[in-house]
Image (cartoon, coloured by chain):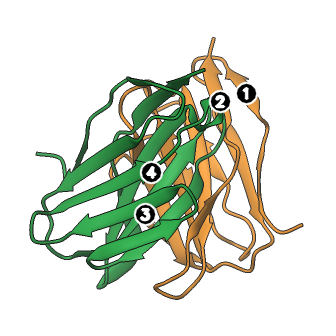
Chain colours: A orange, B green
Amino acid sequence: DGGITQSPKYLFRKEGQNVTLSCEQNLNHDAMYWYRQDPGQGLRLIYYSQIVNDFQKGDIAEGYSVSREKKESFPLTVTSAQKNPTAFYLCASKGGTIDTEAFFGQGTRLTVV
Amino acid sequence: QKEVEQDPGPLSVPEGAIVSLNCTYSNSAFQYFMWYRQYSRKGPELLMYTYSSGNKEDGRFTAQVDKSSKYISLFIRDSQPSDSATYLCAMSARHNFNKFYFGSGTKLNVKP
């Protein structure tokens, strides 16, 4: 079945470590997104990519990095520079026309220990 | 001021009630409006997608857009306990339709 797969579902990070969250889609979508969700704050955009080998910073990009080497993959690295990384991270993808919807993955819950 | 405002709730209603969920926005360029439902610890799923003003109905759900007032609504008829979730509104503009702006979400609890 087509969809977006995020892994792992739960991730624990020690302070000072970098961790990478995986996001893969088989929907042939051009655009992919990473959002962070904290309680009571809705979704905040970290990075998005509209095409392979290109991506733009969102509203809260500091302390995060991404790559888009393949159309189906958009991994997010949470670096040690991110001071408060504990959150629920959501990946999404969207087709290339105006009237197509964005589909979300099931999320990765990252906890700093 | 946030671009999209949404009452966080929680909103608690009895089973069978009509539920009204609302968002207001400040950017008059928004033309595409979406409602997502998110169950606890899951990714959001799209419920309704509307373009510009007007109403759209899908089963028990009706989405309404009033561009003159910069106000959108989602109505749920005959609400069920399975409708208990957080509802997120989202919107985008024609000139940059790949960038979405989300409300903070309204938590709904439908009591049996």
Residue carrying label 3: B34
Q: Residue furthest top?
A: A113
Q: Disc 3 or disc 2, which is closer to the eye?
A: 3
Residue carrying label 2: A109
Look at label 4 and name its amino acid. Answer: Ile
Same-subunit check for callouts 3 and 2? no
Residue carrying label 4: A46
Look at label 2 and name its amino acid. Answer: Arg
Q: Disc 3 or disc 4, which is closer to the eye?
A: 3
Circle 4 SS class: strand
Q: Are marks 1 and 4 in contact (CB under 8 Å)?
A: no
Q: Are marks 1 and 2 in contact (CB under 8 Å)?
A: yes
Question: Would residue A86 be visible to someone looking at this image?
Answer: no
In three-dimensional space, the C-alpha distance between marks 1 and 2, rounded to whole angstroms, equals 6 Å
Q: Position of residue B89 (x, y in %)?
A: 38, 53
Q: Residue at x 15, y 63 (%)?
A: B70
Q: Disc 3 or disc 1, which is closer to the eye?
A: 3
Which chain is mark 4 on?
A
Horizontal arrangement in the rendering, residue A60 relative to residue B61 (left or right): left
Same-subunit check for callouts 3 and 1? no
Q: Residue furthest right?
A: A1
Residue carrying label 1: A11
- Rendered image quadrant of residue B26: bottom left
- Residue A58 or B69: which is nearer the viewer? B69
Marked residue nearer the N-terminal end (1 or 2): 1
Q: Disc 2 or disc 4, which is closer to the eye?
A: 2
Q: Position of residue B11 (x, y in %)?
A: 38, 26
- Whether A40 is drawn above or below B101: the answer is above
User: Within 10 angstroms of label 4, few (less than 14), some, or many (20 or more) residues?
Assistant: many
Question: Would residue A49 be visible to someone looking at this image?
Answer: yes
